[in-house]
Amino acid sequence: MNPLSNPVEKLRGKRYRNECPIHGRNTWIQYSNDPISKLPTMTGKLFSIDIFPRFALIIYRINILIFDIFIFLISAILEYARLIYRYFIPRERKSIEGLNALVTGAGNGIGRQLAIELARNGANIVCLDFLINENEETSAEIKKQFPNIKTWTVTCDVSSKKDVKLAIDVIKKSVGDIDILINNAGTLCCKPFVQHDFDQIERIISTNLLGQLWVLRAILPQMIARDTGYVVAMASFAGHAGVPNMVPYTASKFGIKGMMEALFIELRQGNRAHGIHLMTVSPFLVDTGMIKNRRVRFPDILDIETPERAAEVIISNMRQGNAIVFIPNILYYLMSIIRILPSRVQLLITDFLDSGIGVDYDQQ
């Protein structure tokens, strides 16, 4: 009797020579010992039992890996070509005329200039700050320079999630959807870490980092629903390199940088919100009056920027669709080079540049 006609249970673990329609004559047919399997395994003369399927799987995986590497290399080359092309031929600036922009920390400094610059480009402005008088002055300045631009003022402490929720509800009812979010509100304290008291540390982290998270969490869902919008997060050079005498501030700015990178990847992997543009801004030093004891060894390279000029650069880059902005721009290339160097060499470069923030003795 042909053993293949017997019940499968009696053939487990046994081998028979038979003709296979695929592999030809004299092909070994072995029934698996696995009680779940009811199908024979075909193996050639030169292969041990089950070796051929495993070998084929290995070859398949190698082919897939080679293909993926090829696609990666081609994509990387095309991306570098795109970057070079865009370096010489920047993207056209998109119009933001008629869009609603929310600027946190609009009461003074770079926040005020960002609100004015947005209004200059035709956007309606919602000025948000916990400083009531300063916030009203920003709104009045916008109305004076640009009478046709709509402005609103909202009093809010961004470090309080309760205040943020109430403020965003008011904005939704009185203004409508926000098209542009400028997460700018921040504070700092310039002195050694051990001289910061616990309340100062909590205030810096709550305002700079949690404040951006609260506002972003409240605004982003409506942008995702409409698949459009701009989110600009004000980080700092301190978000890329440790700055002495500003340890809590540096921690908050590193957090902002990580927040924006993670959000970008999350939206990209989710294959949604392609119309939402994220941009992280990292200024070196901007003359806002918050830093009183600063030093710069090479002012021609790392100059102290004015709030007006910084705001112009930020809004221009936002309209061009850039994702990362350093002020001045040379910091982008400097940081890219420094990151690949050994840590001790990085310290030597820091010593050579001799630029940073000194202790503000008024804050002792």
Image (spheres, rainbow, N blue to C red):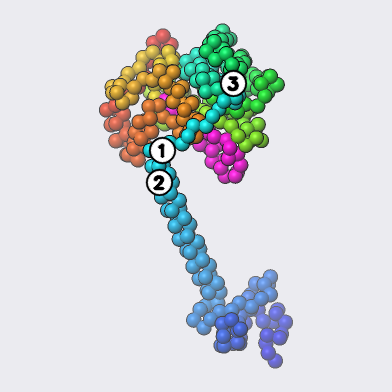
Q: Do labels 3 and 1 touch, CB within 8 Å?
A: no
The image shows residue 103 at horizontal and vertical percentages of 56, 21
15 relative position to 308: left or right: right
Q: Is residue 190 visible?
A: no
Q: CA distance from mark 2 to mark 1?
A: 12 Å
Three-letter amino acid code at disc 3?
A: Asn
Residue farthest right in this picture: 7
Three-letter amino acid code at disc 1?
A: Ile
Q: CA distance from mark 3 to mark 1?
A: 30 Å
Q: Is residue 303 visible?
A: yes
Could you say which disc has been placed on residue 124 in the image?
Answer: 3
The image shows residue 284 at horizontal and vertical percentages of 39, 24
Residue with the mark numbered 2: 81
Label 2: few (<14), some (14–19) or many (≥20) C-alpha neighbours in 10 Å: few
Q: Where does the magenta region start and end?
A: 258-283
Give whichever of 193, 43 is nearer the camera. 43
Q: Quadrant of the C terminus?
A: top left
Q: Quadrant of the N terminus?
A: bottom right
Residue with the mark numbered 1: 89
Identify the residue at horizontal 63%, vertical 75% (top origin): 32
The image shows residue 77 at horizontal and vertical percentages of 41, 50
